[in-house]
Image (cartoon, rainbow, N blue to C red):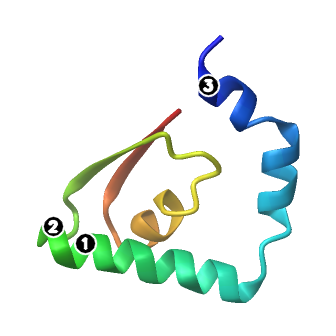
């Protein structure tokens, strides 16, 4: 069994649903920082490997990027 199959279990996703607005804002800021450092411009395509619950995929998509998340 791959490590992520036990790490990203039901409890992980349940806890991610409980994230506060502050947590979501931090995730958005991290996504923006990655975009800035990589000098990306929408609608660039982004692959987020090991995306978990999509903490960064969602804000990236909201910024206009074509995002694919993969476990």
Query: Which mark is nearer the camera, 2 or 3?
Result: 3
Which quarter of the figure has residue 65?
Answer: bottom left
Check whether the beta carbons of the residues at disc 1 and disc 2 lie within 8 A of each other.
Answer: yes
Q: Quadrant of the N terminus?
A: top right
Disc with the residue nearer the chain's start (1 vs 3): 3
Q: Residues within 10 Å of mark 2 (few under 14, many from 20)?
A: few
Say above or below: 38 vs 29.
Answer: above
State the residue position of label 2: 38
Q: How many marks?
A: 3
Q: CA distance from mark 2 to mark 3?
A: 28 Å
Is residue 69 shown above or below 24? above
Q: Nearer the viewer, residue 64 or 36?
A: 36
* Circle 3: element type: helix
Residue at (65%, 50%) from the top-left corner?
Answer: 53
Q: Position of residue 21 (x, y in %)?
A: 72, 86
Q: Residues within 10 Å of mark 3 (few under 14, many from 20)?
A: few
The residue tagged 3 is: 3
Q: Residue at x 79, y 48 (%)?
A: 13
Q: Is residue 63 above or below residue 66?
A: below
Residue 21 at least partly seen: yes
- Regarding mark 1 in the picture, which secondary structure is present there? helix
Q: Earlier in the sequence, mark 2 or mark 3?
A: 3
């Amino acid at each position: 069994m791959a490590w992520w199959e036990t790490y990203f279990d039901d409890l992980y996703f349940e806890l991610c649903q409980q994230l506060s607005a502050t947590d979501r804002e931090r995730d958005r800021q991290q996504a923006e920082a990655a975009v800035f450092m990589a000098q990306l411009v929408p609608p660039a395509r982004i692959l987020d490997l090991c995306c978990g619950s999509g903490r960064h995929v969602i804000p990236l998509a909201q910024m206009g990027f074509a995002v694919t998340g993969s476990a």
